[in-house]
């Protein structure tokens, strides 16, 4: 009698653990590297499916989605599906590739700064393919200029998603940006977002 009961409990426990593991894996894949960066302002993720973008836009009332991938990187069909999902939610989509350089003076960064400076773009969600390297660079720009954080503070605050550390390209860029941004981008002022923080 007790053997059968014990066996049933073990089987039910194992079944429950498998189901929980399955749900966690499904959510990890569906909401790839989704994380809050600055509550109510900036969120991050990897490239997720169009229905997930639509769901997240609705749930968090995002005003903009920032795609940091190179044009066509994930295939033109996925780009078009993302455009339709974002536009269908009456949200702005910025397709601005993040340069792979470690230099803070890349002219492409002007586009990123323009997005970050505009209070009408918040709250926003930022992504690249995996939501790790390029996204970390973009979020560090935000942290350094608009949150007054140091490069070290920004990098330490960001999740590593199973990695031991940020890659050398990200760290070099972020430290260079911290040293040079005031000289290179004097128009980038933290107070441009004050209207959102009252």
Image (cartoon, helix red, strand yellow):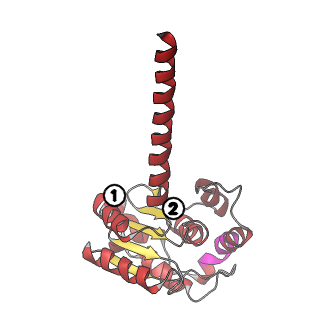
Compared with residue 122, is residue 160 higher up or lower down, i.e. above or below?
Answer: above
Few, some or many C-alpha atoms within 10 Å of disc 1 (few <14, some 14-19, many ≥20)? few
Is 58 placed left or right of 178 in the picture? left
Could one spot residue 61 in this view of the protein? yes
User: Residue at point 59% right, 54% down?
Assistant: 157
Residue 47 position within the rendered picture, expressed as x and y whole percent measured from the top left:
48, 70
Residue with the most extreme top position: 1
User: Residue at point 74% right, 69% down?
Assistant: 168
Q: Main secondary structure of the magenta part?
A: helix
Q: Quadrant of residue 161?
A: bottom right
For label 2, the residue is 147
Could one spot residue 31 in this view of the protein? no
Residue 121 position within the rendered picture, expressed as x and y whole percent measured from the top left:
36, 73
In reply to whether residue 176 is colored magenta, the answer given is: yes
In reply to whether residue 166 is colored magenta, the answer given is: no
Is 164 placed left or right of 183 in the picture? right
Is 122 placed left or right of 137 in the picture? left
For label 1, the residue is 198
Which is more N-terminal, label 1 or label 2? 2
* Range covered by the magenta-colored residues: 174-182
Residue 36 position within the rendered picture, expressed as x and y whole percent measured from the top left:
46, 56
User: Residue at point 69% right, 69% down?
Assistant: 175
Residue 116 position within the rendered picture, expressed as x and y whole percent measured from the top left:
45, 74
């Amino acid at each position: 009698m007790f053997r059968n009961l014990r066996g049933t409990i073990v089987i039910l426990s194992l079944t429950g653990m498998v189901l929980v593991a399955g749900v966690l894996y499904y959510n990890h894949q569906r909401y790839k590297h989704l994380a809050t960066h600055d509550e109510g302002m900036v969120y991050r993720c990897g490239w997720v499916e169009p229905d997930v973008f639509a769901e997240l836009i609705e749930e968090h009332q995002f005003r903009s989605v920032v795609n940091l991938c190179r044009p066509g990187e994930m295939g033109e069909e996925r780009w078009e599906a993302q455009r339709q999902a974002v536009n269908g939610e009456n949200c702005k989509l910025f397709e601005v590739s993040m340069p792979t350089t470690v230099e803070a003076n890349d002219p492409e960064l002007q586009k990123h700064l323009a997005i970050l400076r505009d209070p009408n773009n918040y709250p926003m969600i930022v992504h690249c393919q995996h939501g790790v390297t390029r996204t970390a660079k973009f979020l560090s720009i935000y942290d350094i200029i608009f949150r007054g954080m140091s490069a070290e503070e920004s990098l330490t605050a960001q999740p590593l998603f199973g990695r031991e550390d940020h890659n050398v390209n990200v760290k070099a860029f972020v430290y260079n940006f911290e040293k040079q941004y005031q000289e290179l981008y004097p128009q980038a002022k933290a107070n441009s977002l004050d209207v959102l923080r009252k």
